[in-house]
Image (tube, rainbow, N blue to C red):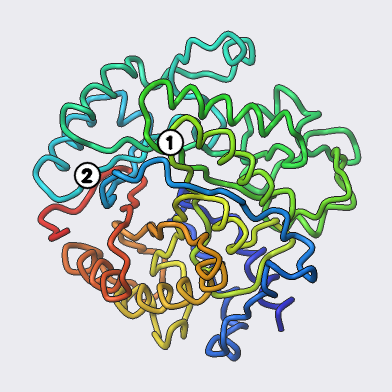
Amino acid sequence: MDMLLASLLMIWGNLSATTPDVTFEKVAQASLDVKNAAVVQPLDPKTKEDPLAHLLPKNKVDPQKDAPQVKGIYVTAYSAGGSKFNSLVKLLDDTALNSMVIDVKDDNGWITWETGNDHLKEMDTTQKMIADMPNVMTTLKDHQIYPIARIVVFKDSVLSKKKPELSFVNPDGTLWANGKKESFVNPYAKEVWDYNIEVAKEAVKAGFKEIQFDYVRFPEGFETRANTLKYAKDERSRIEVVSAFTKYAREQLEPLGVRVSVDIFGYAASVPAAEGIGQDFEKISANVNVICPMIYPSHYSTGWFGAKVPDAAPYVTINGASIDTTKKLAPIEKLGLKPVIRPWIQDFTAKWVPGYIPYGKHELEEQIRALRDNGVNEYLLWNAGNSYTPGVNY
């Protein structure tokens, strides 16, 4: 049963905060017969029976204890560097929204502003979409907007093409890419870790208060090609490698006074860990200050949380996902390692979903109400075009 659920998650693994318009279709349907079973909890990490207990942090602290309760929006680099930025600032001025998650390394792998870092400049992986980062940061500070830097980590077509030895290569020597022609860099490669941390440190210098990592995983369905692709690896499991990256990232960035957060599938809170893509909800959560499960109602198939069309039942779906998240994090809460829970929620209409409903003020407020009913007061709104619903009571 666990293997079935993990496999479903692997199939759905190509979804992320960056692609909420792609449903995991009907792959979760097979899990409905077991959905109401209790979420499986692992062994107590303190016991010798857990081989990955060494990945748990010893002295995790929150370097941003005075941070606001974040209610934020996603902002592309193009929006941050263009005329749309002013209207987004006004949206936050006029509402209880108070934070922006801005792309500083985007879904292709481009660093989105000129960092001034000679090593990064030599990498030739910068595309200056944000022409004046100091002005952006000054504006955010003047308007009391909490700045969060989004870094897409292991999905990185730019670096993969420049350094195939850091990526995955087909048996014929060509660079591997998924069906969308996207390539990933190898999570086993320490050089990849340090490259992304270097970008993060430049974002800290620019003034960001939190680094949010996305695509902290292997490619979707990796277990089906792990033995045929050519790439450097060691004896560690994929779960261990991905969790070790989050531990390393926090240890590198915490002394700089910034929080570390990770985007993760909301669905991952409802199923066991997925070895195929290397994601373990608990172990990643234990090593970050903030965990951001992506719980868009449109991404749950028929029957989830008792809803015939989860997209048409925003309260029910968010409530169910929140309950599962609380259960999943219970073991690390006992160890004092539970992070702030700050989900991504849906501010878009999923027209591709059979039985979908238009999303507007009511649907946003229903999602927020469900979060609050579960003691969750922080959230991020996703809209790929950065067009957010007006008049919402946040």
| Coordinates of residue 232 in the picture (x, y in percent) | 86, 38
Q: How far across and down, in percent of the image, does residue 374 sit?
A: 32, 74
Q: Residue at x 74, y 33 (%)?
A: 190
Residue 212 image position (x, y, % from top left): 46, 42
| Residue at x 74%, y 39% (from the top left corner) | 186
Mark 1 vs 2, N-terminal side: 2
Foreground mark, 1 or 2, reads 1
Q: Is residue 266 above or below residue 67?
A: below
- Label 1 CA crowd tier, 10 Å (few <14, some 14–19, many 20+): many
Secondary structure category for the residue under label 2: loop
Q: Quadrant of the C terminus?
A: bottom left
Q: Secondary structure at mark 1?
A: loop
Task: Identify the image quadrant of residue 207.
Answer: top left
The residue under label 2 is 98
Task: Estimate the spatial distance between the alpha carbons at disc 1 and disc 2, rounded to whole Å.
Answer: 17 Å
Q: Residue at x 66, y 48 (%)?
A: 179
Q: Which mark is residue 258?
A: 1
Image position of 373 (left or right of 161)? left
Name the side, left or right, on which 66 lies relative to 352.
left
